[in-house]
């Protein structure tokens, strides 16, 4: 039996240092809004764990999020949804850096 491919969209955010605690908390509404959009599944978000420091660990980010997609076409369609683009535009002023990793698992 052939396994189905799963596409993961992994995001890292470094929020601006001058944000208030309330603004940092408000940024979570970005993820809550993304959860409501079609195509994505299992959206989860969080902050760095308090892992023991080691050379390969980078926990300098403020938030990360991950979600699954059934196909590359759905992942790319999601990225072009007007609602997605509006959320990105609304919350872009909150972060100074963002990094995306898209991965396919067999």
Image (tube, rainbow, N blue to C red):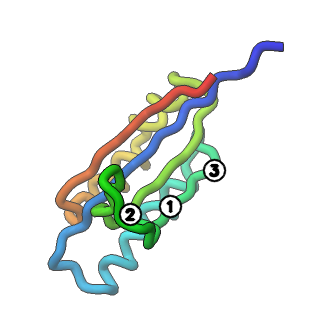
Spot the residue most to the top.
Answer: 1
Most foreground residue, 59 or 79: 59
Count residues near mark 3 (Cα–Cα under 10 Å), then give few for <14, some for 14-19, many for 20+: few
User: Which residue is found at the position 39% from the left and 38% from the top?
Assistant: 101
Query: Where residue 86 sits in the image (x, y, percent)?
Result: 34, 52
Cβ–Cβ below 8 Å for labels 3 and 1?
no
Which residue is under mark 3? 42
Residue 94 to residue 24: above or below: above
Cβ–Cβ below 8 Å for labels 1 and 2?
yes
The answer to whether one can see residue 91 in this image is no
Most foreground residue, 39 or 55: 55
User: Which residue is found at the position 35% from the left and 65% from the top?
Assistant: 53
Which residue is under mark 1? 45
The image quarter containing residue 105 is top right
User: Which residue is found at the position 74% from the left and 20% from the top?
Assistant: 3
Count residues near mark 1 (Cα–Cα under 10 Å), then give few for <14, some for 14-19, many for 20+: some
User: Which residue is found at the position 17% from the left and 74% from the top?
Assistant: 17
Which residue is under mark 2? 63
Most foreground residue, 86 or 92: 92
User: From the viewer's perspective, is 34 left or right of 24?
Assistant: right
Q: State the quadrant of the C terminus.
A: top right
Which is nearer the N-term, disc 1 or disc 2? 1
- The span from disc 1 to disc 2 (Cα, nearest Å) is 7 Å
């Amino acid at each position: 039996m052939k396994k189905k491919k799963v596409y993961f969209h992994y995001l890292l955010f470094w929020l601006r240092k001058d944000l208030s605690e309330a603004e940092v908390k408000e940024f979570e509404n970005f993820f809550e809004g993304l959860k409501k959009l079609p195509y994505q599944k299992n959206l989860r978000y969080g902050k760095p764990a308090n892992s023991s420091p080691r050379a390969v660990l980078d926990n300098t980010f403020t938030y990360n999020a991950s979600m699954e997609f059934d196909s590359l076409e759905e992942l790319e369609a999601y990225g072009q949804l007007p609602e997605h683009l509006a959320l990105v535009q609304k919350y872009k002023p909150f972060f100074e850096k963002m990094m995306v990793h898209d991965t396919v698992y067999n």
